[in-house]
Image (cartoon, rainbow, N blue to C red):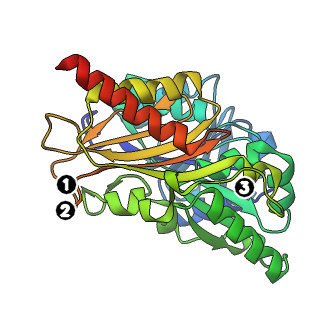
Amino acid sequence: MTPHHDAPIPVTLLTGFLGSGKTTVLNRLVRALPRTAILMNEFGEVALDHQLLEKMDGPLALLSGGCVCCTISGTLSPTLKNLWMARQKGELPAFERVIIETTGVADPAPVLDNLLNDRWVCARFRLDGVVTTVDALFGMGQLDEHFEAVKQVSVADRLLLTKTDLAPAGTVAALTARLAGLNPAAEIVTAVNGEIDPARIQNLGLWNAETKSADVARWLKASRYRPARAGLPGARPGVPAHDSRIRAFSVVLDPPLDPYGLHAALSMLASLRAENLLRFKAIVNLAGETQPVVLHGVQHVLYPEVKLPAWPDDDHRSRFVFITRDLDPAFVEKLLVDFAAAASRMAS
């Protein structure tokens, strides 16, 4: 029996718009990744390859290779708890990872909220990354017409471009450029017929399980974002309407920041501007601390802060990257500066 204090089980959130190839990718991953638990909303909505099914038992399916698939019962937390308990008792194969497949129009934020704010769950599972499938043939139209598709792209750690064999090369190139503009940090990987190297969807978060260390530069990728002060115009000719409302930008602050002021600024953004704050990441220098702190958030969900043992390089400035909707980069930067300065003055 595996004790509960073992390393938390990595969880991958697989999202993507309707018809973008999530199920095809899932079928391939189940074959390539033994001992995986697949969670989905409804079996009937997802055409899992019948060759993978060994037994169906209500909301549970045992798959070949020691994998298990089940439907999400109500909220996500009870399903994860039931799976973990069955694993502990030996009633299920000792799965080593979890993939959660969302519906095609799902907002990923509530799933992330469950994973990060249920204390029982987050002690036993850890979010490894968000993977979003994008249809090379119809992706441009979906991004034009459905903001849900834009949001799924914005929160991704990795983008899987599907059906590239069916789309003209010019369409694929234009879509790739558009995705890079919406989410500069997410690597874009091509998956033909759902085939993907499983390593390309693993270790996408701050911590690399293989090296057992934090890789801040890979995770933050601050150099790919335009500085907030560069001035990002609104609607402009030739730019799709949804995209002109999205801002991907960086903020770099030199002096150490007051922790209370910074927390107040980010909490205000996450609570009052949740729909506008699609995603942010940061490594920050807090006043009175010698170690850097990593911060991360998606909409209203603020991840628990992580204190690193040491700075990853000689640059000890606070570095933020944001992806926002209808939120002026200059406003965000001023908010961080003003709140930190006000809190610092009050403390002194």
Instruction: Compare residues 133 and 338 and report the one nearer the observer.
Output: 338
Label 2 to label 1: alpha-carbon separation: 7 Å
Q: Kindly identify the amino acid type of the residue bearing the numbered disc 2.
A: Asp
Pair 3/1: label in front: 1
Lower position in the chain sequence, tag 2 or tag 3 = 3
Q: Kindly identify the amino acid type of the residue bearing the numbered disc 3.
A: Thr
Q: Which residue is mark 3?
A: 23
Label 3 to label 1: alpha-carbon separation: 40 Å
Q: Secondary structure at mark 3?
A: helix
Q: Is residue 254 left or right of residue 236?
A: left
Image coordinates of residue 123 in percent, x first then y, are 33, 31
Q: Is residue 249 left or right of residue 244?
A: left
Figure quadrant of residue 277 = top right
Q: Which residue is mark 2?
A: 314
What is the quadrant of the C terminus in the image?
Answer: top left
Q: Residues within 10 Å of mark 1 (few under 14, many from 20)?
A: some
Instruction: Compare residues 59 and 189 and report the one nearer the observer.
Output: 189
What is the quadrant of the N terminus in the image?
Answer: top left
Q: Residue at x 43, y 65 (%)?
A: 223
Label 2 to label 3: alpha-carbon separation: 44 Å
Q: Residue at x 46, y 36 (%)?
A: 334
Q: Residues within 10 Å of mark 2 (few under 14, many from 20)?
A: few
Q: Secondary structure at mark 2?
A: loop
Vertical placement of residue 327 versus 85, above or below: below
**Is disc 2 in contact with disc 1, using a CB cutoff of under 8 Å?**
yes
Q: Which label belongs to residue 311?
A: 1
Figure quadrant of residue 173 = bottom right
Q: Residue at x 44, y 30 (%)?
A: 266
Lower position in the chain sequence, tag 3 or tag 1 = 3
Q: Kindly identify the amino acid type of the residue bearing the numbered disc 1.
A: Trp
Pair 2/1: label in front: 2
